[in-house]
Image: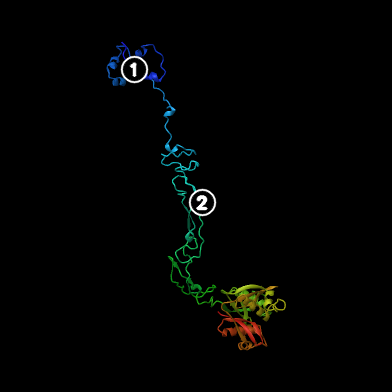
């Protein structure tokens, strides 16, 4: 008797429908699917329910291979990619929540990076957003500008610095605020101070306390004068000492002149804070009294320049004497000093002179007044020389000075001398 196909047979028929089955004679499939009666398990399989029969899986069936879906069954493209003309993955389908806003520009699509060009690359309705700002400069010069303005890239340019003032701001843009910004000044000399600027507010100015004056070209005691007490000093020495500095100044062959001027210049250069000197302002025997001077301006002046101030001091008609005294005095005054003396040293075409300023005074006197301090300097017997050196030195001391030199000018009975304070 031919049984209708049960569940197992149905599976077999489906397998043959999906794979190439060999052609079988009638009833062969039943023979394969339905074992002969009496086989072990056959009756149990026939008596079992359809589900139980499937669970027994008496036949090992070959699985069909995976099959590609037909074209009409392929998944549709994402909605946002439909209508993508420029190939950037985004189209303009009406159902796309973020459609491409420019199908003619592949750089424009939802989520694209923004560039400074006046376009809305990321299709969010805003142009050139998120390009941030640049910062440059420090202090008052600090500037912050957008990197993109109206579709064009911009460059940050710091502001121009100004003079620092006391306001808590770095006006000169050097990284520090209010340095040297205070303007109030008090005191003089070494006591001079500038008010401090604290937290943008100028503090009261307080001068420093004065100190004892020392030889340092500074106004240590804050009285408006520099090195007073050290500007000029009368020093007693000997010709036997001076000759060691210049061999012609021996007190015999020469007691005053160009050789002794050079010897005194060199001798005074090693005395305290003095840099040069003049004299002798007194002399007797081997004793020579000289005046050593500090805080002078040493200059080398050609005779041609001196002659321009007083013609006879041209290096030929005169190299040392009353005309050169006048020429040196006038030349130093033309340089802004009070007076000057020399020559300290002599060369063939030029001389070394010393110009004096602070602590020096050029004063007019008469030969009669000078003769009252040393008789030979009366304008007749002597107008310039060792006796007038002594007379001028003594006259200046009588005026409250340390010493003096000259005459730097003389005419008739009048003479101008230069006195130096200590």
Decide: is 205 above or below 98: below
Viewer-nearest residue: 260 or 75: 75
Left or right: residue 208 compared with residue 417? left
| Residue 370 quadrant | bottom right
Q: Quadrant of the C terminus?
A: bottom right
User: Could you tell me if residue 304 is visible in this image?
Assistant: yes
Q: Quadrant of the N terminus?
A: top left
Which residue in the structure is indicated by mark 1? 9
Q: Which sits earlier in the primary sequence, circle 1 or circle 2?
A: 1
State the SS at label 2: strand
Viewer-nearest residue: 246 or 21: 21
Q: Residue furthest right?
A: 316
Q: Which mark is residue 152?
A: 2
User: Could you tell me if residue 58 is visible in this image?
Assistant: no
Decide: is 222 above or below 2: below
State the SS at label 1: helix
Q: Residue furthest top?
A: 1
Q: Which mark is residue 143?
A: none
Tell me residue 389's x, y (percent). Answer: 63, 83
Residue at the image point whose x is 35% and y is 12% from the top: 31
Dot in front, 1 or 2: 2
Tell me residue 180's x, y (percent). Answer: 48, 66
Q: Are marks 1 and 2 in contact (CB under 8 Å)?
A: no
Decide: is 39 above or below 294: above
Marks 1 and 2, how far apart at CA: 79 Å
Asked which colour scheme the image uses, the reply is rainbow
Residue at the image point whose x is 43% and y is 28% from the top: 72
Tell me residue 131's x, y (percent). Answer: 47, 50
Tell me residue 409's x, y (percent). Answer: 64, 82
């Amino acid at each position: 008797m031919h049984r209708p196909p049960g569940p197992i047979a149905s599976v077999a028929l489906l397998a043959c429908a999906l794979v190439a089955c060999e052609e079988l004679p009638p009833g062969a499939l039943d023979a394969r699917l339905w074992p002969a009666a009496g086989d072990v398990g056959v009756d149990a399989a026939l008596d079992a329910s359809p589900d139980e029969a499937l669970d027994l899986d008496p036949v090992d069936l070959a699985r069909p291979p995976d099959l590609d879906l037909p074209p009409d069954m392929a998944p549709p493209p994402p909605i946002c990619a439909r209508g993508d003309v420029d190939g950037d993955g985004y189209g303009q389908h009406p159902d796309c929540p973020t459609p491409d806003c420019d199908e003619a520009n592949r750089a424009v699509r939802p989520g694209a990076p923004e560039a400074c060009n006046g376009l809305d690359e990321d299709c969010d309705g805003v142009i050139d957003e998120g390009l941030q700002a640049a910062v440059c400069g420090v202090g008052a010069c600090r500037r912050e500008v957008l990197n993109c303005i109206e579709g064009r890239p911009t460059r940050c340019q710091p502001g121009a610095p100004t003079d620092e003032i006391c306001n808590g701001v770095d006006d000169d843009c050097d990284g520090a605020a209010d340095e040297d910004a205070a303007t109030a000044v008090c005191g003089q000399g070494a006591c001079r101070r500038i008010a401090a600027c604290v937290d943008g507010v100028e503090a009261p100015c307080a001068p420093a306390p004065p100190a004892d004056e020392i030889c340092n070209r500074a106004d240590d005691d804050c009285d408006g004068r520099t090195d007073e007490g050290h500007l000029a000093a009368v020093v007693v020495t000997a010709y036997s000492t001076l000759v060691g500095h210049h061999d012609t100044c021996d007190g015999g062959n020469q007691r005053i002149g160009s050789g002794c001027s050079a010897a005194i210049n060199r001798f005074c250069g090693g005395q305290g804070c003095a840099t040069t000197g003049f004299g002798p302002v007194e002399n007797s025997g081997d004793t020579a009294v000289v005046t050593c001077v500090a805080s002078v301006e040493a200059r080398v002046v050609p005779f041609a320049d001196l002659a321009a101030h007083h013609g006879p001091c041209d290096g030929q008609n005169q190299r040392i004497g009353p005309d050169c005294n006048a020429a040196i005095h006038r030349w130093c005054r033309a340089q802004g000093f009070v007076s000057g003396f020399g020559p300290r040293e002599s060369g063939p075409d030029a001389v070394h002179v010393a110009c004096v300023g602070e602590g020096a005074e050029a004063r007019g006197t008469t030969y009669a007044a000078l003769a009252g301090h040393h008789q030979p300097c009366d304008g007749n017997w002597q107008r310039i020389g060792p006796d007038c050196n002594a007379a001028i030195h003594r006259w200046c001391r009588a005026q409250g000075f340390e010493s003096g030199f000259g005459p730097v000018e003389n005419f008739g009975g009048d003479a101008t001398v230069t006195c130096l304070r200590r």
